[in-house]
Image (tube, helix red, strand yellow):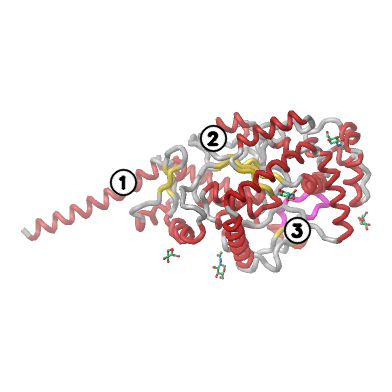
Amino acid sequence: MQVTRRKYVWILCIGWVIFMFSWNLKIFRNNGQSTLQPKSAIRILQFDTDPFLQTSTQGTYVTVQRSVNVKKQIKDNTTKINDCKRKTNIVFIKTHKTASTAVQNILLRYGLHNNLKIAFPKDVHDFGYPQFFSSQSVAKQGSDPYNIVCHHMRMIYDVLKGFMPKETPFVTIVREPGQLFESTFDYMLGIVPSFQRVPHHGNTSIEDWLDNAATYMRAAGSSAYGNFAKNSMFFDLGYNNMIDDDQYIEKALAELTEIFDLVLVSDYFDESMVLFADLLCWDLEDVACLSLNARSHDNDGNAEIKRARIRGKARLWNKSDAALFDYFNATLRRKIEEFGMKKMEAAVNRLKEIRRNLTETCVEGEGAVDSSKISDLNFKKTIFKPKGVSVASYNLKPGAEKLDICRQLIASENTFSREVFNTQRDRLTQYFWRV
Ligand SMILES: *C1O[C@H](CO)[C@@H](O)[C@H](O)[C@H]1NC(C)=O
Ligand SMILES: *[C@@H]1O[C@H](CO)[C@@H](O)[C@H](O)[C@H]1NC(C)=O
Ligand SMILES: *[C@@H]1O[C@H](CO)[C@@H](O)[C@H](O)[C@H]1NC(C)=O
Ligand SMILES: *[C@@H]1O[C@H](CO)[C@@H](O)[C@H](O)[C@H]1NC(C)=O
Ligand SMILES: CC(=O)N[C@H]1CO[C@H](CO)[C@@H](O)[C@@H]1O
């Protein structure tokens, strides 16, 4: 009697173990978008009887690693702005010279840590820019839909909309066009033919160029990078950057308002990132970053006055970009008011604190330094910078290179993209092996 009861208990236990095992396996199979690597699979078998499941907007399940969950649950307690369901699909249109690299870094890290599927360009850097986006330019990795698009492109909305799951939020970023132009001129001098037509005598050339912009552009003829010389944001968003017609601009703004769930403004970066976290239902920790791929510059009073004059001229020249900026700057203002000024202030302070902590943990010295002062030679080699341009970068604290978060925060665009691309490829390959 005793013996048979013990046997019964044993059979129940073994049955339970087998059931749990196959149940866990089933999760992997149903879940091509976020397969787990062997190590985390073991972890789940050991600890995780209630895997943390999230619905993506297509209704499929995305399993997030347990080790990440625990941290997230602790974080959620303190920094989630609203109680809502995390969004895992997003299109970010990465405009040029607008702090978009920092936003891309955030999205790459989020995708990597949450096993989301990022659409990478075949060349890892851009989707055939300055040509319009096409799915041909995406490096194919499996047949499941993508979660994130965040590399440079010239947007063509209908194609992108068809490429991504329904209801995917669209986000982009704009910058005050005077500063944008200054930055673009400096950074793109080497590749934009019309910029090179102006005689260079140090810092005066940008103003000389603007005073005769139309002539220089005509003389340079058409070029693959001509779009950087006028209304480059307007161009990146898919419009004709040479048309200054009010009606055309108005129509474009109406369309863009329909397309984008949020337009970030790099001049109000922190407020923008709070709204970004709010839109996607992410934690503030998820949207903390350091400034990347920015030019470094010195400040003196005279230079500032001159800069203001140049910015005024650049605004005039870039009429559609100026209209675009003013419009979405006003939109952002309105969204901040809707969010609540007090709540925004608190969230921005918290975001700043998170960034300060990250900086303290990872970065040597005061913060960003000129790329020429980067001491890690291997890292220095990976920093992309046009000839003669100073780019701000970071030295890691001794030992901080062992922390993934630190390496990833300061990594340059192409290096980090490639790293995430390779990790994703390995993960997806393992998935196909298992099936
Ligand atoms: C740049 O401008 C400043 C102030 O106008 C001037 O003092 C300086 O000489 C200029 N530099 C060059 C290289 O022209
Ligand atoms: C989470 O919040 C609750 C209620 O506000 C609090 O009692 C608890 O200690 C918090 N937990 C953590 C880990 O911060
Ligand atoms: C953005 O809009 C605000 C309020 O409408 C305005 O005060 C501010 O100057 C604008 N920013 C820029 C950079 O033009
Ligand atoms: C930042 O670090 C301090 C000290 O370690 C800690 O008390 C604080 O909670 C941290 N803040 C955030 C936002 O992580
Ligand atoms: C420098 C230049 O050509 N600026 C032009 C910018 O656009 C406005 C409006 O179309 C023109 O009046 C300016 O001449």
Q: Type of residue at label 1?
A: Ser
Q: Nearer the viewer, residue 228 or 302?
A: 302
Q: Nearer the viewer, residue 216 or 76?
A: 76
Picture layout, residue 128 above or below residue 181: above
Where is residue 364 shown, x and y percent of the image? 68, 67
Q: Earlier in the sequence, mark 2 or mark 3?
A: 2
Q: Residue furthest left?
A: 1
Q: Earlier in the sequence, mark 3 or mark 1?
A: 1
Tell which tag, 2 or 3, sits nearer the viewer.
Answer: 2
Q: CA distance from mark 3 to mark 1?
A: 52 Å
Displayed quadrant of residue 44: bottom left
Prevailing secondary structure of the magenta residues: loop
Q: Does residue 177 appear in this view?
A: yes
Q: Earlier in the sequence, mark 1 or mark 2?
A: 1
Mark 1 nearby-residue class (10 Å; few <14, some 14–19, many ≥20): few
Q: Type of residue at label 3?
A: Ser
Span colored in magenta: 380-390
- Report the quarter where the N terminus lies: bottom left
- Answer left or right for 67 relative to 188: left
Q: Type of residue at label 2?
A: Met
- Give the residue at x 82% y 45%: 185
Where is residue 257 shown, x and y percent of the image? 63, 36
The disc label shown at residue 22, or none? 1
| Residue that badge 2 annotates | 164
User: Where ligand 1 lies, by image quadrant?
Assistant: bottom right
Q: Tell me whether the residue at label 1 lies in contact with that at label 2, contact meaning CB atoms closer than 8 angstroms.
A: no
The disc label shown at residue 371, or none? 3
Q: CA distance from mark 2 to mark 3?
A: 37 Å
Magenta-span inclusion, residue 307: no
Where is residue 198 shown, x and y percent of the image? 91, 42
Q: Tell me whether the residue at label 3 lies in contact with that at label 1, contact meaning CB atoms closer than 8 angstroms.
A: no
